[in-house]
Image (cartoon, rainbow, N blue to C red):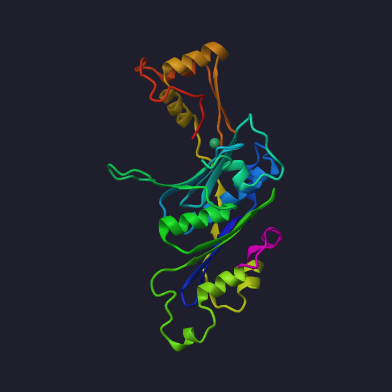
């Protein structure tokens, strides 16, 4: 198992620790496109963060983290399902220059209009149920800080994240203070400690540097950080790349686009080519395929007739 999410609990159950280590999954995410290093770093950190947060939810469906930018990056998106299969992609603005030393703020929040959006989409929705969506400004210098702000504002949960990514690995550590009995020392044992478990855990993990996260395996990191603590370890969970795109889903998207729009693309190019933004898989619809799309409903109007075809 190369890609894993590992979970631990402090013995006094005040603090949850998780570590995600992704190599194959992350390699897949970059297999069809070469991202410039600053973009790759942000996307890799968001991939690690999505894995850590999805692993934290008892989710039958998907968690989607989106960073909408108003600068050189227009969108970073990661979709992680309850089984920890995920896909991710980036949309860049072609007319913007991408500085080598670009940061989250300079690449995504150039004019202060960047947004971080979290979508929780249950797989089997009840009638009338819609996906949960939380939107916050892009506050923070790093992906970790943006998420920490979000978790505190929306979930009222103390969460700390350390994230890192290079071309070979996307990785991160999550600490979360557990609600309930945690944090309230009632006996002398707790009172005798200088710091409670949460402060201790944050202090220990606070020494983590990106280089260490990237160059060290997850077991070693956990041992180095918490060797003085008693941790309960859970069974490691596998993480994998999976893009659920299909010709059927592209066909549905083209139907949404409407017969008129599809015909005009056909007239111009002789066929309709759509490439999956996430995995790069090409889908081609010749005139016969296109005619079949609208069989029986040839005049269905476009529900969203604007823009070029993109796949979600
Ligand atoms: Zn795909």
Q: Quadrant of residue 40?
A: top right
Ligand 1: which quarter?
Answer: top right
Whole-percent x and y of residue 290? 47, 18
Query: Is residue 256 shown to the viewer in this render?
Result: yes
Q: In terms of depth relative to the viewer, which is nearer, 204 or 129?
A: 204
Residue 34 picture location, percent across and down: 68, 38
Q: Is residue 233 magenta?
A: no
275 vs 191, left or right, is right
x and y, in percent, of residue 222 in the image:
62, 69
Front-lying residue, 83 or 301: 301
Q: Residue furthest front?
A: 111
Q: How many marks?
A: 0
7 over 97 or under it: above or below: below
Q: Residue furthest top?
A: 267
Specify whether residue 209 is painted magenta: yes
**Above or below — where is 290 with respect to 18?**
above
Start-end of magenta stretch:
206-219
């Amino acid at each position: 198992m190369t890609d894993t999410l590992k979970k631990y609990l402090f013995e006094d159950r005040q603090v949850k620790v998780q570590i995600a280590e992704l190599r194959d999954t992350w390699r897949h995410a970059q297999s069809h496109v070469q991202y410039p290093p600053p973009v790759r770093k942000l996307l890799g950190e968001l991939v690690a963060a999505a894995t850590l947060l999805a692993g934290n939810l008892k989710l039958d469906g998907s968690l989607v983290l989106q960073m909408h930018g108003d600068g050189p990056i227009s969108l970073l998106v990661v979709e992680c399902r309850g089984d920890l299969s995920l896909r991710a992609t980036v949309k860049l603005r072609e007319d913007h220059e991408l500085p080598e030393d670009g940061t989250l703020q300079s690449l995504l929040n150039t004019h202060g209009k960047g947004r971080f959006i979290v979508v929780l989409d249950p797989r089997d929705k009840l009638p009338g149920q819609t996906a949960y969506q939380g939107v916050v400004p892009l506050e923070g210098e790093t992906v970790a800080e943006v998420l920490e702000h979000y978790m505190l504002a929306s979930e009222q949960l103390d969460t700390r994240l350390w994230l890192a990514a290079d071309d070979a690995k996307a990785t991160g550590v999550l600490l979360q203070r557990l609600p309930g009995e945690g944090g309230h020392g009632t006996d002398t044992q707790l009172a005798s400690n200088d710091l409670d478990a949460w402060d201790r855990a944050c202090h220990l993990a606070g020494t983590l540097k990106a280089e260490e996260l990237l160059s060290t395996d997850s077991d070693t990191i956990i041992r180095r950080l918490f060797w003085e603590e008693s941790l309960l370890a859970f069974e490691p969970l596998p993480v994998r790349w999976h893009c659920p795109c299909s010709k059927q889903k592209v066909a549905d998207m083209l139907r949404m686009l409407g017969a008129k729009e599809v015909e005009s693309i056909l007239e111009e190019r002789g066929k309709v080519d759509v490439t999956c933004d996430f995995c790069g898989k090409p889908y081609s619809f010749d005139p016969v395929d296109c005619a079949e799309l609208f069989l029986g409903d040839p005049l269905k109007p476009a529900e969203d007739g604007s823009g070029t075809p993109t796949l979600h």
